[in-house]
Image (cartoon, rainbow, N blue to C red):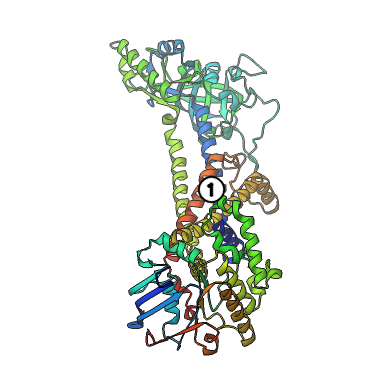
Amino acid sequence: MYKLILAFRYLYRRRISYLALAAVALCVFIVVVVMTVMDGLVGDFKRKNHNYTGDCVVGTESLVGFPYYEDFARIAEKEDYVEAVAPVIKSYALIGTEVSGRNIGVELMGVEAASYGRVTGFGLTLHYHKNDPSKAFNIKSDANLPGFVIGADLWSGRNEKGEYFYTPNPDATPLSVTCFPLTAKGALAKAGTDVVNTKTFYFSDSSQSGLARVDGSIIYLPFDEAKVLCGMTEPVKRASWIHIKFKQGVSIEEGCRQVRQMWAKFCDEHKGKDNAELLSQVSVRSWKEHRRESIAGMEKEQTMLMMMFGLVGLTTVFIVYVVFYMIISHKTRDIGILKSIGTSCGDVIVLFLGFAAGIGVIGSAVGVLGGTLFLRNINGIESWLFERFGFQLWDRTIYAIGEIPHQLDLTFVLVVTGCAILACLAGAVLPSVGAARNNPADVLQVSQL
Amino acid sequence: MSKDGFIIEAKGIHKTYRMGAAQVQVLKGADIAVKKGEFVAIVGASGSGKSTLLHILGALDRPDKGVVQFEERDLSGMSGGELNEYRNKMIGFVFQFYHLLDELNVLENVILPAMVPAGIFGWISKRAEVKKRGLELLKAVSLEQRATHKPYQLSGGERQRAAIARALINEPRLLLADEPTGNLDSATGNGILELLERLNRAGQTIVMVTHDERVARRAGRTITLADGKVK
């Protein structure tokens, strides 16, 4: 009991304790705020990639694509763990407006709007056909015109708040799309001066996936139109990818494993058929593997940040060590007194470790409270800073970031708090052991006072 | 208690300290024996080893050579835990500089030795009883009005009386006082000596270290230390 009382008294009577408290609180505050924002950004980025891709992707990076996709899609759709299947054509195209005559290179995605909307979050990304992706290519003014959906960053600018400029009733702006059709062998499908396929499409909607690279480089066309433009109709119909969504409760790993088995069986059954060699280029990937190139960078940054905070943690240990060294060097007389009345070495260690744990608990609580308050108001603070001083954490005209993430993860907070307390104990353990080893006769000598 | 009636007995105590490169032999075979109920003063010049001998009797220090027996039990044979219990229950220390803890008030300082062996639940069960005894002791040393004061709010004499009350909280068999009046003016010191005399009359065994012959004369018996030995 006396250890508890003394630890508490040392804590609030010694001003130097406040220094250790402030160091712990500051470290916890920084870790909580930065990691919450970083985790939020990474989590949001992953969620957007998952939405963009679906659960599983069967296909090839080759612009030639692979045949018999319809057969495989039909088989896959019958599986009890599969919710929906959507074939996709992916290629590259030149787009140009008839007014300006300017051309830019883009990624072309040929999708069946309805099935693609069931497999992915395509419907959520649309502005004019939100939650109704089956009508994504429909143009209100003329239902016979072929529509296109274009990445939001390709089509319109963003203001400083990250909002796009939309008109309530968009014009069916024409856009010419030019592709190089390829044969199943990868050669140009056409010869002479007319090697490209060009067709005019009309604006039906824009897609804002929240992925800067996607929104700034992709144009969506109806699947059948894209197939013709890319020459994927002859000699056998081809597609680039089949996106699959699993039923609820099916894990991504398990679903992908079953699709791989299904694909292997499918390849065996199609051996020797026309262009069947293209099937060997096909891989089955989870959404994470498919988008690895985009996600890996952010995950690496997150890991580096964790490492940096590990170093911050070491600094905390050192600060606590120094503070405890100073406190204990001022408390040797107390240690002598305590030993003279029968306190054991272990109890002296427990007393100072209790003191350290107190600093850890209170410092963490202050840091978490400060971090929570700061995170709760982080977007308001940023808006205020922007309005007053023109400062933004991320320039919304450049970065596809809406709100700054501020959702606290309770488990993460508990882990950080636990680490902070451990760091305090680690910093205090050496000085505490040193204190316990003091000889009371030495420290209580008149000459030592 | 030994068959000779000694509560504590030290034989052939040697102690050497290292001071830089030099070794200083403070005690060179000191012997001392104290009977129950005695009030013994150890006198000697500064550096004669009085405090060192007292620390060895109280198990705050270990002799290099020699035997200390408390009620016929050899201190060198005691484990660390037993020595802690010995310091807590058998011995009460009074120091020249009082050595009260600044973070605790007077009553908390007094009852601190009673809190040391008790766990949280043990303390909760006996807290009231110990506090009552602490207040009684403070009354006995005329400090009942100062129970909630901090040590820095007390005079030197009051602090020493509080330290004596602390030393008595666990009803020790032996009170060891190291220059208890050394830091006090004559009148205040006299008050402390009267208090010690009163305690001794009530049956408390006391061993007091002092360099002052006048103080030593207040004890029932005087032992003189010179050149590391008892004369």
In this view, the residue in front, A54 or A282, is A54
Q: Position of residue A24 (x, y in %)?
A: 54, 56
Compared with residue A335, is residue A169 higher up or lower down, i.e. above or below? Answer: above
In this view, the residue in front, B181 or B71, is B71
Say which residue label 1 marks.
Answer: A417
Say which quadrant the N terminus of chain A sits in.
bottom right
Res A372 seen here = yes
Q: Secondary structure at mark 1?
A: helix
In this view, the residue in front, B220 or A192, is B220
Q: Position of residue B149 (x, y in %)?
A: 68, 69
The amino acid type, in three-letter code, at marker 1 is Thr
Q: Looking at the image, how many numbered discs can be counted on the residues?
A: 1
Q: Quadrant of residue A3?
A: bottom right
B109 left or right of A191? Answer: right
- Name the chain under label 1: A
Q: Position of residue A142 (x, y in %)?
A: 65, 16
Q: In percent of the image, x 44 and y 47: which residue is there?
A: A304
Q: In percent of the image, x 52 and y 88: which residue is there?
A: B212
